[in-house]
Image (cartoon, helix red, strand yellow):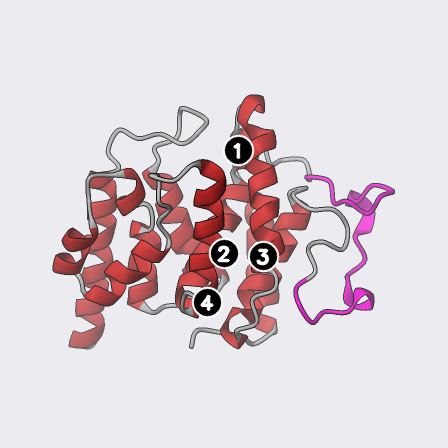
């Protein structure tokens, strides 16, 4: 391992430590899972499924909720890493001073103007939230899925070439986890005739049913399959 790569890896490991410390004591919405698990999964989705190994993106994935949900602020991130990472994390941060409807609108507008690297991190975040949705209490499941579907209707129109693979994987996960109805998972520029046969796991409406075995974590063989299919499409890190 050359010195530059070693320094980059050390920065990613430092980000993982900061994430663990900053989110200490926080739990996911199932009130059981340490919140930091979500950050690690987002980083893994970005690297292993989407195929991006840019240390700045991995650090951003690990720290994407720190400004919004912890005492860590922009200046802390800028001092620990650099202004670009701090800026990317800020673009993934909602302004909680605003009422919810205005907050979400401002957040989507900010993401629309963000660099493709930030958008890739958000897609990884959406993927993990959808994969984890089955663990939510019924009271919050409906609201969360409605929000994820609302996000996806915007995200699927992103046209940066670097996002082709992440968008295709996100569309598959959204459909297979029951987050969107037939056709809504299609990414921009994909004809209806290009859709794969939904197979025996789809109901008559075409909505993909959540396969058995998703009680807590997605089946490993399904994650491996998505990863291999993404590699075959030949879109990697840029």
Whichever of callouts 4 and 2 sits on the residue coming sooner in the sequence is: 4
For the residues labelled 4 and 2, say whether their Cβ atoms are less than 8 Å apart: no
For label 2, the residue is: 123
For label 4, the residue is: 51
Residue 168 lies, in percent from the top left, at: 61, 63
Side of 119 relative to 23 (left or right): right
Range covered by the magenta-colored residues: 187-210
Residue with the most extreme right position: 204
Query: Disc 3 versus disc 2: distance between alpha carbons?
Result: 11 Å
Residue 55 lies, in percent from the top left, at: 29, 66
Q: Residues within 10 Å of mark 1 (few under 14, many from 20)?
A: few
Tag 3 secondary structure: helix
Mark number, residue 216 = 1
Identify the residue shown where x is 12% and y is 58%.
Answer: 79
Query: Disc 1 versus disc 3: distance between alpha carbons?
Result: 28 Å
Side of 21 relative to 223 (left or right): left
């Amino acid at each position: 391992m050359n010195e530059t790569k070693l320094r980059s890896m050390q920065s990613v490991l430092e980000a993982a430590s900061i994430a663990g410390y900053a989110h200490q004591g926080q739990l996911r919405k199932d009130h059981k899972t340490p919140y930091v698990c979500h950050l690690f999964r987002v980083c893994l989705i970005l690297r292993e499924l989407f195929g991006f190994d840019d240390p700045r993106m991995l650090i951003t994935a690990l720290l994407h909720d720190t400004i919004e949900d912890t005492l860590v602020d922009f200046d802390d991130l800028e001092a620990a890493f650099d202004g670009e990472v701090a800026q990317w994390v800020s673009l993934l941060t909602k302004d909680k001073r605003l009422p919810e409807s205005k907050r979400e609108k401002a957040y989507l507008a900010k993401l629309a103007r963000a660099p493709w690297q930030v958008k890739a991190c958000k897609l990884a975040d959406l993927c993990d939230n959808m994969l984890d949705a089955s663990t939510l209490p019924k009271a919050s499941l409906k609201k969360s899925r409605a929000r994820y579907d609302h996000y996806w209707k915007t995200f699927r129109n992103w046209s940066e070439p670097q996002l082709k693979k992440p968008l295709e994987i996100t569309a598959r996960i959204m459909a297979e986890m029951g987050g969107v109805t037939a056709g809504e998972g299609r990414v921009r520029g994909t004809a209806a005739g290009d859709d794969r046969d939904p197979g025996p796991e789809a109901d008559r409406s075409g909505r993909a049913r959540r396969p058995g075995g998703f009680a807590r974590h997605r089946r490993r063989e399904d994650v491996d399959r998505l990863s291999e299919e993404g590699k075959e499409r030949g879109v990697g890190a840029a």
